[in-house]
Amino acid sequence: MKSPLSYLPLASGFLVLVLSLAIGVLTVTSKNTLVSPSQNMSTKAAQETGSLSLSPATGDYSFAAGTSYPVGIIVSSGEKSLDGVGIIINFDPKMAQVVGKVTTANLFEQYMVNSIDNVSGQIKLGALTFTSKPVTGVVGTFKFTPLKPGTVDFTFVFTPGSTTDTNLAETKTARDVLGSVENASYVFK
């Protein structure tokens, strides 16, 4: 008898396919939607968009070889329920190295992607939930070690409206509801 988890890669692939198709249909149909001039767009946008941030966002430190520093990845879906999150963060591998993997939290049920590439300078984290709900909190934490004095930046790969970078997938519509990101910058003297 096969383990129920043996079907997880197939289910994850199917979910990605369904989400991609739903985003395509939504994109085509949303171009014909009219907005009433009396709608308060800023309030509506605040309710419909989520955010990702790094905490702490800034810091000034004395450089000490071999010392590592934790950084939290914070997600907020606003009022929207999520099916999943995809995160890509770039950094300069000549300035810092990420230690180990991202330590994940319990906000999502399945973490399918958790990779660190210290050669190209990229962190990837992808997670799904099977009980869709609004999500706010720490999705994961990583530690980095600065390699020399200077500035270490961690930057989300994010283009509004793009579905191939950092995203928050809304339940039922598969729309990307990520509206803003807050990157991090640390100075080592």
Image (cartoon, helix red, strand yellow):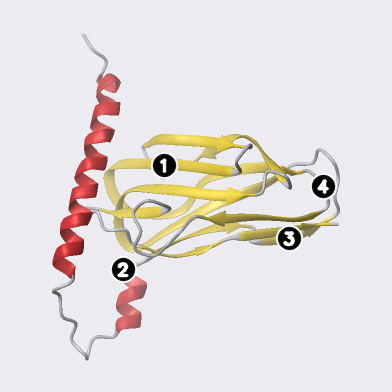
Q: Do residues under tags 4 and 1 come within 8 Å of each other at their CB atoms?
A: no
Q: To which residue does mark 4 refer?
A: 148
Q: According to the image, label 1 marks what residue?
A: 126
Nearest to N terminus: mark 4 or mark 3: 3
User: How far apart, in angstroms, are the residues tagged by discs 4 and 1?
Assistant: 30 Å
Labels 1 and 2: the sequence-earlier one: 2
The answer to which image quadrant residue 126 occupies is top left
Q: Position of residue 120 (x, y in %)?
A: 60, 41
In the displayed structure, does residue 117 sit left or right of residue 145? Answer: left
SS type, badge 1: strand
Element carrying mark 3: strand
Q: Quadrant of residue 179?
A: bottom left
Q: Which residue is mark 2?
A: 48
The residue depicted at 58 percent of the width and 60 percent of the height is 183
Report which residue position mark 3 lands on: 59
Real-space CA distance between mark 1 and mark 3, rounded to the nearest whole angstrom: 27 Å
Query: Residue 122: horizontal and vertical position, in percent?
Result: 56, 43
Give the distance between the C-alpha atoms of the residues marked 2 and 3, in whole angstroms. Answer: 31 Å
Nearest to N terminus: mark 4 or mark 2: 2
Q: What's the CA distance linking mark 4 and mark 3?
A: 15 Å
Which label's residue is closer to the chain start, 4 or 1?
1
| Residue at (48% x, 36% y) in the render | 114
Instruction: Mark 4 and mark 2 in contact? Answer it, CB < 8 Å.
Output: no
Residue 47 percent location from the top left of the image: 33, 71
- Label 2 is placed on what type of residue? Glu
Determine whether 181 is above or below 143 in the image: below
For the residue carrying disc 3, how many other residues have a C-alpha within 10 Å: few (<14), some (14-19), or many (20+)? few
Q: Give the position of the N terminus as an image quadrant.
A: top left
Determine contact: label 1, label 3, CB under 8 Å.
Answer: no
Residue at 57% x, 56% y is: 155
Q: Amino acid at mark 1?
A: Gly
Query: What is the distance, in whole Å, between disc 1 and disc 2 at their CAs?
Result: 21 Å
